[in-house]
């Protein structure tokens, strides 16, 4: 039923696709099974087998090079999700609480009647979960304390050696890449044991539920898992998400969503419906003009307006505007300026140039990307952060200068 979803030969830079394909599989293949008129143990155990295979596949890909991505996926950084997550995935307490919520909220429902076996298991299972979670969190704190100590030592060494070249993300990467990184190996064990706890909890629950009860539990569980598919995009499209993103922008960024007049003052433009009859103001040669946004959020395509007389009256000299530059860390050894330019130009048309630097002390590469459009710079900082490029996650930040 799952096809090659759980294959074990994915390159590191395609791990993000596993989560996307898993969510699509739940939505298109698993959840519809529970909406059939006749429920069956065959469907229940087919879905249950896929859930177990999902956690086994995550464990297979857990190495010291990937474990931080698996423990802290970039698309599960939404603060609204944090309380229900535990070490990279759903908190195992949620499994037991889902069943208890069915019982509490619909006590007369025949589906969840006669649950004496569940009542006996519930207390024991929750004690096991609480004890294991407490132990794993304690080990996690110890591993992170060790990571912080090593990070601090490397950061200070780099700082004293060359204060102008000290970069936080490159220092963290050097800690991850240590050959004797006992810390990273411990994080791998913690991640694997957390998934084992999730699998064991589901197995114990299955043993005390009948066919209809299990179908209801698995359907709700699948819907919950499917809801984690790259919610960063869904979150940004929500009213609450847009509000938070706007709050994070510098105050002047919103002014860029309207075209500039030569005086740099934003005039009152006609409505988008009348935009097709609107003749743009004459702009100096080389002046960057930003097209306005339609109500749907799509950019209205406009051609640059160059009257024949413009060249006659335009200034003969024009000082180019400074670019808008971002920092790109954790680049792969094979990264070049041309490849970096090609990667960002796929998504952003205003990319001007790129530059790659090499830190001789750490042996790591980092770079910079310059944009002509400040809106695209801010979008790239959000959208491209922790995306894979040549097998490594890029760490995006704001550059100190607006030129490369």
Image (cartoon, rainbow, N blue to C red):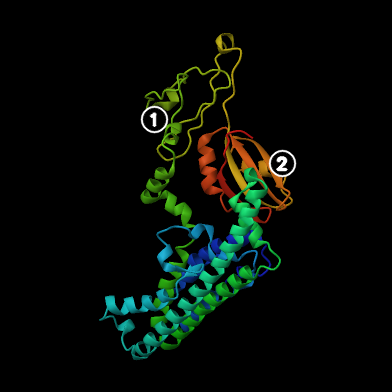
Work out whether mark 1 precedes mark 2 in sequence or the reverse, and give the earlier one.
Answer: 1
Residue 241 visible somewhere in the drawing: yes
> Which residue lies most toward the top here?
312
| Residue at the image position 36 percent from the left and 49 percent from the top | 239
Query: Would residue 220 appear left or right of 62 to someone viewing this image?
Result: left
Classify residue 66 by image quadrant: bottom right
Query: Foreground: 26 or 104?
Result: 104
Residue sitting nearer the eye, 223 or 119: 119
Q: Residues within 10 Å of mark 2 (few under 14, many from 20)?
A: few
At x 45%, y 35%, the residue is 253
Q: Give the farthest residue toward the front.
A: 160
Q: Residue at x 54, y 26 (%)?
A: 288
Residue 338, labelled with which disc? 2
Quadrant including the N terminus? bottom right
Label ID, residue 273: 1
Q: Report whether 259 appears left or right of 59.
A: left
Element assignment for label 1: helix
Describe residue 253's horizontal placement relative to residue 268 as left or right.
Answer: right
In the rendered image of this protein, does residue 342 appear above or below residue 38? above
């Amino acid at each position: 039923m799952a096809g090659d979803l759980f294959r074990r030969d994915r390159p590191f830079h395609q791990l993000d696709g596993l989560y996307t394909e898993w969510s699509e599989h739940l939505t298109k293949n698993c959840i519809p099974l529970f909406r059939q008129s006749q429920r069956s143990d065959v469907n229940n155990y087919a879905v249950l087998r896929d859930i177990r295979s999902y956690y086994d596949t995550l464990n297979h890909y857990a190495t010291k090079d990937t474990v931080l991505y698996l423990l802290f996926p970039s698309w599960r950084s939404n603060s609204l999700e944090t309380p229900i997550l535990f070490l990279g995935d759903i908190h195992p307490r949620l499994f037991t609480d889902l069943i208890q919520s069915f019982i509490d909220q619909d006590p007369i429902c025949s589906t969840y009647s006669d649950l004496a076996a569940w009542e006996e298991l519930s207390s024991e299972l929750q004690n096991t979960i609480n004890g294991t979670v407490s132990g794993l969190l304690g080990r996690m704190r110890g591993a992170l304390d060790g990571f912080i100590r090593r990070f601090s030592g490397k950061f200070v060494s780099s700082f004293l050696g060359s204060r102008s070249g000290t970069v936080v993300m490159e220092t963290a990467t050097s800690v991850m890449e240590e050959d004797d990184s006992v810390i990273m190996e411990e994080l791998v064990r913690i991640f694997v044991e957390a998934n084992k706890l999730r699998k064991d909890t589901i197995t114990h629950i299955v043993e005390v539920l009948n066919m209809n009860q299990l179908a209801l539990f698995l359907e709700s569980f699948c819907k919950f898992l499917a809801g984690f598919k790259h919610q960063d995009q869904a979150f940004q499209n929500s009213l609450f998400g847009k509000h938070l993103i706007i709050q994070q922008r510098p105050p002047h960024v919103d002014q860029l969503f309207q075209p500039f007049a030569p005086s740099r003052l934003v005039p009152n433009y006609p409505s988008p419906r009348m935009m097709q009859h609107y003749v743009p103001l004459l702009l100096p040669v080389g002046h960057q003009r930003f097209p306005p946004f339609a109500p749907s959020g799509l950019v209205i395509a406009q051609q640059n307006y160059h009257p024949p007389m413009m060249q006659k009256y335009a200034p003969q000299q024009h000082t180019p505007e400074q670019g808008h530059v971002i920092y790109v860390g954790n680049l792969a050894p094979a990264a070049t300026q041309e490849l970096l330019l090609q990667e960002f130009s796929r998504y952003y048309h205003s990319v001007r140039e790129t530059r790659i630097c090499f830190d001789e002390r750490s042996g790591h590469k980092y770079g910079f990307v310059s944009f002509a459009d400040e809106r695209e710079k801010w979008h790239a900082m959000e959208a491209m952060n922790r995306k894979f490029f040549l097998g490594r996650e890029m760490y995006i930040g704001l550059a100190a200068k607006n030129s490369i």
